[in-house]
Amino acid sequence: MSRAFVKEDGGERWTPPAEAHEYRVVLPRAGTPEIVRETDDLIGALLWMRARPSAGFELRARDGKLLACA
C-alpha cells in the first residue's frame, strides 16, 4: 500500500473530509453546542425541527448565522 494513503499516527487509511452542508440543526449547550443534523435542504430542516418543538434546537447557516429557533 502506498504511504500516501496511510495516516502516520495510526496506520489507518485516509478518508476524505466530510462534505460541508449549507444548514445545521444545533442543540445549544453550555460550552460546545452539539450538531444533530446537517443538510442542504432548508425546508426539510425546518420541518424536522417543527416535529420536535420542545427540544430547543437552533437552525444555523454554514457561516454560523442563526436562522431559526424551535
Image: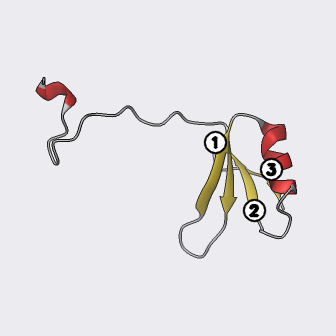
Residue at disc 1, secondary structure: loop
| Type of the residue with mark 3 | Trp
- Furthest residue in direction top, as rendered: 2
| Mark 3 lies on residue | 48
Sequence-wise, which precedes: disc 1 or disc 2? 2
**Which is more toward the observer, 52 or 23?**
52
| Mark 1 lies on residue | 62
Instruction: Tell me the CA gap for discs 1 and 3.
Output: 18 Å
Left-right relation of 56 to 21: right
The answer to whether residue 43 is above or below residue 50 is: above
Q: Residue at x 54, y 73 (%)?
A: 31
Colouring scheme, one of rainbow, by chain, secondary structure, one colour: secondary structure
| Type of the residue with mark 2 | Phe
Sequence-wise, which precedes: disc 1 or disc 3? 3
Q: Residue at x 28, y 34 (%)?
A: 14
The answer to whether residue 69 is above or below residue 24 is: below
| Mark 2 lies on residue | 57
The answer to whether residue 4 is above or below residue 20 is: above
Residue 52 horizontal/vertical position (percent): 82, 61
Mark 1 against mark 3, which lies toward the viewer?
A: 3
Residue 21 horizontal/vertical position (percent): 62, 36
